[in-house]
Amino acid sequence: MTKGIFITAEGPEGAGKTTIIDLLAQDLRSKGYEVLQTREPGGIELAEKIREIILNPNHTSMDARTEALLYAAARRQHLVEKVRPALEKGFIILCDRFIDSSLAYQGYARGLGIDEVYSINHFAIEGTMPDLTLYFDIDPEVGLKRIQKHSGREVNRLDLENLSFHQKVREGYYLLLEKYHNRIYKVDAAQSIEIVLQEVSAKVYERLNNKEKRKRPCSST
């Protein structure tokens, strides 16, 4: 068992997960927890360079399998270089996207197959899965409108996809919710930031408390 805890944030474009993760990290640090906040694709120099290739709006000709493989490659390097070492040191990892993004976007929305994309990523992550995944759910139309209003946000190649693609992404996430219901927790991201943060914080602290209880030795009678 690793010393730390691995928490990932997932959701369609414009769900607001990055904002909530920022606020959650601040709150955890204020309570004395050691937190590593990172993102995918990216988080380290090599993976950030792969991110530039994947999300560049000019790369519209990219093949779906190429896209899936690039995500898996970035994920592998990020995992071994940053995530696993921090987990061994006992950090709480807050990662903006992980394997579920590949399963929803490339596996389902791109039509490559969830199982097929999982097999690529299974090779990349060697069994390292999140302890908890927070899925921020929002109607794709609402999410895309949020992006349009947010002038400071990075506009990437996936943002340029049509509405039907983003609807398929959401459908993909719903399939993952059914498949991994013990790990993935659904949050209504259409609510106010305050309410979403309160709900997410409660779930995270519940998971942290459960982990602490499991680590405590049983007292002898």
Image (cartoon, grey):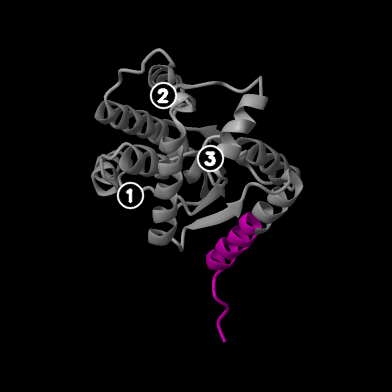
Q: Which mark is residue 47?
A: 2
Q: CA distance from mark 2 to mark 3?
A: 27 Å
**Would residue 8 appear left or right of 17 to someone viewing this image?**
left
Residue bounds of the magenta highlight: 203-221
Residue appearing at x 73%, y 46% in the figure: 192
Q: Amino acid at mark 1?
A: Gly
* Circles 1 and 2: CB atoms closer than 8 Å: no
Q: Which residue in the protein does label 1 denote? A: 127
Identify the image quadrant of the N terminus: bottom left
Q: Secondary structure at mark 2?
A: helix
Crowding at dot 2, Cα within 10 Å, few <14 / some 14-19 / many 20+, comes out as many
Residue 187 screen position, x and y as percent: 60, 53
Q: Check disc 1: other Cα within 10 Å, few if <14, some if 14-19, many if 20+.
A: few
Q: Please tell me whether residue 91 is drawn above or below residue 184 in the rendered image.
A: above
Q: Which mark is residue 140?
A: 3
- Of labels 2 and 3, earlier in sequence is 2
Gap in Å between the C-alphas at discs 1 and 2? Answer: 20 Å
Amino acid at dot 3: Pro
Is tag 1's residue or tag 2's residue first in the polypeptide sequence?
2
Dots 2, 3 in contact, CB < 8 A: no
Q: Is residue 152 above or below residue 112?
A: above
Q: Position of residue 88 (x, y in %)?
A: 47, 45
Q: Amino acid at mark 2?
A: Ala
Disc sitting over residue 23 in the figure? none
Secondary structure under tag 1 reads loop
Question: Circle 3 — which element?
Answer: helix
- Classify residue 81 by image quadrant: top left
Q: Residue at left 58%, top 60%?
A: 207
For discs 1 and 3, the disc positioned in front in the rendered view: 3
